Image (cartoon, rainbow, N blue to C red):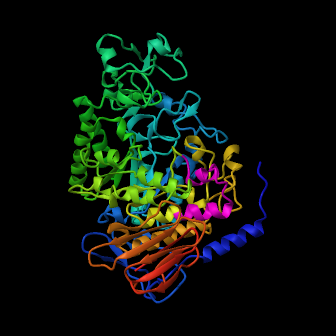
Amino acid sequence: MKQPKQKIKKLFKLSSLLLSGSLLLACSEQGPVQPEQKAGGGSTVQVAETGTQPLSSIKAKDLAPYQERGIEDEVFYFVLPDRFQNGDTSNDLGAKADDELRSLSRGGLDKSHKGMYHGGDLAGLTEKLAYLDEMGITAIWLTPILRNQAVNAGTAGYHGYWILDFTEVDPHLGTNAELKHFIDQAHQRNIKVFFDIITNHTADIIKYTECHGEDGLGWFGDENGCKFKSLAQVASGDKYQTVIPAGTEKVKTPDWLNNPDYYHNQGDSFWQGESSLNGDFAGLDDVKTEDPVVVDGMIEIYKDIISEFKPDGFRIDTVKHVNLAFWQAFSPALLEHAKSLGIDNFFMFGEVYSADPELLSQFTTTGKLQSVLDFGLQSALYQALIEQKGTDTLATLFEQDHFYKDTDSDANQLLSFTGNHDMGRFAHALNKSQHDYGEQEKIQRTLLANALIYFSRGVPVIYYGDEQGFVGDGGDQDARQDMMPSEVASYNDDDLLATDSTTAADNFDRQHPFYQKFAEFARVYQTYPALRYGKQETIFSQQSPGVFAFSRHHQDTQPLTIIVNTATTPQSIELEKKLTATSPLYHLGDKAQVTANEKGHSVSMPPLSLAIYQ
């Protein structure tokens, strides 16, 4: 167990941190700020630029109606409902004991085990909508909420990715009616709701006699799972014999998902070559998405989901493990269906786990998805702010934005993030860095990374708990801490950033410096259309840690210049154009020094700082 730090010292540092950023914006004295529609999409909050004023938060209700907003206007919060808030303890065990039809969806509760259910649910999320609203969140992305296989191989489906039934909510999380209530309550606050969906696989029900025995209940594979068999092997007769364990022949819904013919059944993926498309994802039943029956079936499943629940969009899991032709059929069909129901701005973004923009963009151009998660930016932030590589890593990434340009989308619609439930948190990466960062530097680097996902092109996504300084011990289960008081020892011994609290306590602290800074970032993001819709151009980068400068320009609005210093020493940049004011619109960290010269202005940036100028 780590020893607690001197609280008085940490509070002094945090007070200094909060005072180090300022914004030249003030709220209207006439009441809540109202959005003004701008040509070309989006809205801007009307504020008076009358000098440095205390920053007020912006709420979703201050923006354009959720039905009218484009994806660029959103600030996302990505959350695992099971790890957030337990609003109804009666559903903690999932399906009722006498519900034989749903017996595989019962159990798995162990609040002290990082791989089991902890009790969070839709009722808890609904309770905490105000907490999210006040941080400037406008869209909530939930991990899958459909009925799962509760327990498999000593761990639980608390994360939602082991779907058995595509028609109903997992009983650990609530009911279909409770999901509709949650969406209704979010919509009343003008907040959107996005579902995490899966087409690549279903729960692990299909077994192979060669690996699991004649009854499907044994295990004869090795530590790498059931060895993958290629299509060539299958064609030659070298294939697995499928077996469905007794009593599980009809556990999936819709019923066609119970037919092994609609799965690849080629053994476990080793994440390369053909196995990446056709292999079982860590044992999960890999759906044969090239089969027309499967294509039509999956389209109908998610049409029904849209019809029943009216979500605002989907995040799509494991996109690169599905053949491209599937997405070419799937995405247009669902968009058309959503429009037929009056959901004109329905939006889908995929998880393509790659940092290569050329590969990522194939799914938004050829594959017809609207967008993808920007693993490229996450990688560049990691290199620039954790590994201390040059800021040209950022410039190189943004130079490839042209790959995303097509008739209906561009890089402004990418979903930007610093870490997630699979790879782990940005703060953990800082912790394990060879640079042995102290706490104050971890705080500054974390805030700078998050500022860049708000102020560079793309749509910001906050991973739940980051606003409370969560750290974690790695990826997957080690990055899925509880916001409600936790009983997991490996969570509770973490030294959270910018707070003396631990995950053993309730972590919905609106006074946490990160929560307050993220609310500031959201305010700035919503104030200037250029930060959401603007074309981005690099002004300066270098091969070592230091200055990265870029501009954002949207239609007839005045261009913004964003300057970042990733170094731990002051850095200067010569701007060839004069700034309209030497005081920044917003700054993070100590304030830059600006002096005029013959060509424009010289800006001296303090260590690990950011400034926005007009």
x 33%, y 15%: residue? 233
| For residue 387, above or below residue 500 | above
Residue 39: give x, y in percent of width and height.
24, 74
Q: Nearer the viewer, residue 607 or 134?
A: 607
Q: In this picture, which residue range is highlighted in magenta? A: 424-448
Q: Nearer the viewer, residue 217 or 26?
A: 26
Residue 381: give x, y in percent of width and height.
49, 56
431 inside magenta stretch: yes
x 56%, y 65%: residue? 567
Q: Is residue 119 among what the camera can see?
A: no
Number of numbered discs overlaid on the protein picture: 0
Q: Residue furthest front?
A: 598
Residue 318: give x, y in percent of width and height.
39, 39
Left or right: where 416 falls relative to 348: right
Residue 457: give x, y in percent of width and height.
38, 63
Q: Nearer the viewer, residue 349 or 269?
A: 269
Which quadrant of the figure contains the C terminus? bottom left
| For residue 423, above or below residue 157 | below
Q: Is residue 413 among what the camera can see?
A: yes
| For residue 103, above or below residue 472 | above
* Magenta residues, dominant SS class: helix
214 inside magenta stretch: no
